[in-house]
Structures are given as structure tokens and as C-alpha cells.
Image (cartoon, grey):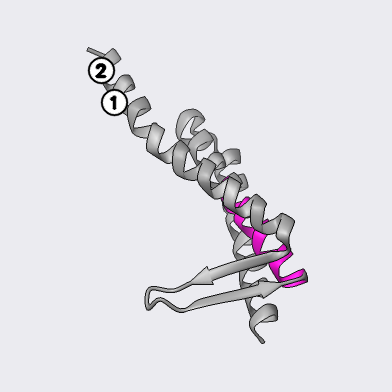
């Protein structure tokens, strides 16, 4: 009986890993081209280049690490991992906000 929940959990991780892999690929592509593109729910697209794009892309990579640290926390349940998770979230958020504010100003 314990094998079934583990199988369901692992099967549920397949789409998450696919989306994360796609995000890594697209962010890496944007980083190499020196741009970052942001779109909102109204169909508006904003693009930043240069230093602002580097900050935004590093922030996105930080959010990927943030997700990984949370998954590690779910497995280990270590308070240290939760602190690492929180720190990556704050730093990544700051990078993205600063990059967008600098690039769109």
C-alpha cells in the first residue's frame, strides 16, 4: 500500500520537472542573448536588456534553486533547509524587482 502514494507522488513530479526544465532552457537562452522578456495577463510584453536582463535572469535561476530547496525541505524537513529556501526567495525576488525597475525606467 505504501508503494502507491510514492508512485503517485513521482508521477506528479514529471510535469513539474518538465516545466522547470523548460524554464531553465528559456532563461538560459535569454541570458545568452542579453535580454529578459516579461508579459502580463493583458497581453503586454516588456523587454529589458543589458545589466537589467542579467539581474532578472539570475533572479529566475534563483527561483529555480528556491523551488529545489523547498522540495529538499519537503523530503528532509530540516529547519536549515527552510532558512536556505527563504533566503533564496528573498534574494531572487530582489534581483527580479531591481532588474525590472532598472530596465523599465
Is residue 57 on the magenta stretch? yes
Residue 7 position by quadrant: top left
Residue appearing at x 77%, y 70% in the figure: 51
Query: Helix, strand or loop at disc 1?
Result: helix
Q: Mark 1 sits on what residue?
A: 8
**What span is in magenta?**
51-64
Residue appearing at x 48%, y 71% in the figure: 39
Numbered tag placed on residue 52 in the rendering: none
| Residue sticking out furthest to the right | 51
Distance between mark 2 and mark 1 Cα atoms: 6 Å
Disc 1 packing (10 Å; few <14; some 14–19; many ≥20): few
- 2 and 1 marks in contact (CB < 8 Å): yes
* Viewer-closest of 62 and 29: 29
Q: Is residue 100 above or below residue 24?
A: below
Place of residue 9 in the rendered image (x, y in percent of width and height, measured from the top left): 33, 28
Magenta span dominant secondary structure: helix
Place of residue 84 in the rendered image (x, y in percent of width and height, measured from the top left): 62, 46
Q: Mark 2 sits on what residue?
A: 4
| Residue sticking out furthest to the front | 33
Amino acid at each position: 500500500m505504501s508503494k502507491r502514494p510514492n508512485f503517485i507522488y513521482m508521477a506528479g513530479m514529471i510535469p513539474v520537472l518538465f516545466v522547470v526544465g523548460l524554464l531553465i532552457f528559456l532563461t538560459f537562452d535569454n541570458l545568452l542573448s542579453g535580454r529578459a522578456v516579461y508579459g502580463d495577463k493583458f497581453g503586454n510584453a516588456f523587454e529589458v536588456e543589458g545589466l537589467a536582463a542579467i539581474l532578472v535572469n539570475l533572479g529566475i535561476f534563483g527561483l529555480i534553486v528556491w523551488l529545489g530547496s523547498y522540495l529538499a525541505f519537503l523530503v528532509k524537513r530540516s529547519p536549515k533547509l527552510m532558512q536556505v529556501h527563504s533566503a533564496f526567495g528573498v534574494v531572487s525576488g530582489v534581483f527580479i524587482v531591481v532588474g525590472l525597475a532598472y530596465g523599465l525606467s
